[in-house]
Image: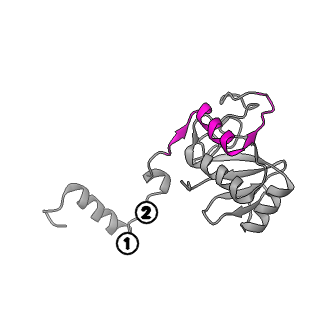
Amino acid sequence: MSRLMTRPAALAASAALLTGGLLAAATPAATAAAPAKYSQAAAERQLKRAGVTWVSSGGCSNRNNSRCTSFEKINKSTVAGVIDFKKASRCAVTLTAGTERGHASGTYSHWNGYKVDIKLTSCVNSYITHKFRYVGTRGDGAKQYKSSSGNVYAREGSHWDVTYYRGTR
């Protein structure tokens, strides 16, 4: 290695040699800026303005209560995705879960603002299964469909578990 290389460049060159000349790409989550988030009130305003409704088995919005439906710290791109889905499908869209506790963990989780649950209706079911590409069954048996923007809709027992990987706004 050249003595004129900066320390970071020398480290990168060493890493490239160790990996057979191929630099491993960092994961999107590790390199991407943190997504912009909404407060509960701001998310509710956006959803209500678009005609999206929500229900809560506990009649509440406390993020730390699994019986509530919370939008606190939901990604702005997730809200935009829900609104875009409603507009494109022309279906009534009712959310049954947001960012509250009680869901599986992980980078692209409810808690981290990437997921919502959408109530099953014949309109929603038909739109997803006819307009999106079937991509297989998840480990828990949920059939998955992928939109052209890369979002994944998984048919769980009583709802669609939707992961919004990308924003459309």
Which one is in front, 104 or 111? 111
Mark 1: give few (<14), some (14-19) or many (20+) Cα within 10 Å: few
Which one is in front, 36 or 67? 36
- Place of residue 54 in the rendered image (x, y in percent of width and height, measured from the top left): 75, 39
Which portion, as a residue range, is magenta? Answer: 35-59
**Of marks 1 and 2, which one's residue comes earlier in the chain?**
1
Q: Is disc 1 placed on a helix, strand or loop? A: loop
Identified by mark 2, the residue type is: Ala
- Place of residue 2 in the rendered image (x, y in percent of width and height, measured from the top left): 16, 66
Residue 125: image tag: none
Q: Is residue 45 magenta?
A: yes
Decide if residue 139 is in sight here.
no
Q: Give the labeled residue for mark 1.
A: 20
Colouring convention used in this rendered image of the protein: one colour
Q: Is residue 65 magenta?
A: no
Please name the residue shown 53% across and 40% down the image: 37
Mark 2: give few (<14), some (14-19) or many (20+) Cα within 10 Å: few
- Place of residue 38 in the rendered image (x, y in percent of width and height, measured from the top left): 56, 37
Query: What residue occupies the far right of the structure in this picture?
Result: 122
- Place of residue 33 in the rendered image (x, y in percent of width and height, measured from the top left): 44, 48
Residue 25: image tag: 2
Decide if residue 56 is in sight here.
yes
Q: CA distance from mark 1 to mark 2?
A: 14 Å
